[in-house]
Image (spheres, grey):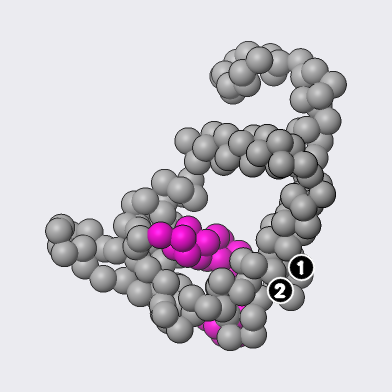
Amino acid sequence: MPHTPESGKTPPTLTPDELHITGLVPLLEPFFRGGVVRDLMPAPLREAMETYGLTPRHGAVLPQLLAGRPLTVSEIARRLHVSLPTASELVGGLSRAGIVQRAEDPSNRRRILVSLSDAYRPHLETFIARRSEPLLRALDELSPSERAGFVAGLTAWVREVQG
């Protein structure tokens, strides 16, 4: 049963399986916030974040830049579900700290491309690897078909969240 929020309608009744799954979401919150995250950061990245007063909201930009090509500020705003001014502010803070670099898009000089600074890329890769260890251990316990199902479900969830 697809779940879509509709204004003014009573929320759908969840099946026991759906209730179990949605009950897990709040349990995942500590995995994404707080001291756990700070303690896993390599010292240079943590020090830059602290020195420049950067918050977890700033940190949310970084994994977006790790895997691929440079992104525009608009793409970052869309991926993080924040306004363009907020995304610009987050990128500005990261740029002042030297963690990201901003450059004109050669194909459209009005657009700014954002990429990770080469100096911080290995630190962010280390951080992401550390954050991924519990997930990778959990996946190791699954059969190949269970793992494929889990990854397919997680991928679908991310696609829904990113809209």
The quarter of the picture where the N terminus appears is: top right
Q: Secondary structure at mark 1?
A: helix
- Residue 68 x/y as whole percent: 41, 60
Q: Which residue is mark 2?
A: 40
User: Which residue is outermost to the front?
Assistant: 144
Q: Please state which of residues 136 and 120 is positioned toward the viewer in this rendering.
A: 136
Which of the numbered marks, if any, corresponds to residue 36? 1
Count of numbered circles in the view: 2
Horizontally, is 101 left or right of 51 in the view? left
- Residue 27 x/y as whole percent: 81, 47
Q: Amino acid at mark 1?
A: Val
Q: Is residue 72 above or below residue 97?
A: above
Horizontally, is 144 left or right of 19 in the view? left
Where is residue 129, by image quadrant? bottom right
**Is residue 13 inside the magenta stretch?**
no
Q: Amino acid at mark 2?
A: Leu
- Residue 9 x/y as whole percent: 63, 13
Contact (CB < 8 A) between labels 2 and 1? yes
**Secondary structure mainly formed by the magenta segment:** helix
Can residue 46 be seen here?
Answer: yes
Can residue 33 be seen here?
Answer: no
Horizontally, is 113 left or right of 138 in the view? left
Q: Is residue 30 above or below residue 23?
A: below
| Magenta stretch in the rendered image | 46-68
Where is residue 10, by image quadrant? top right
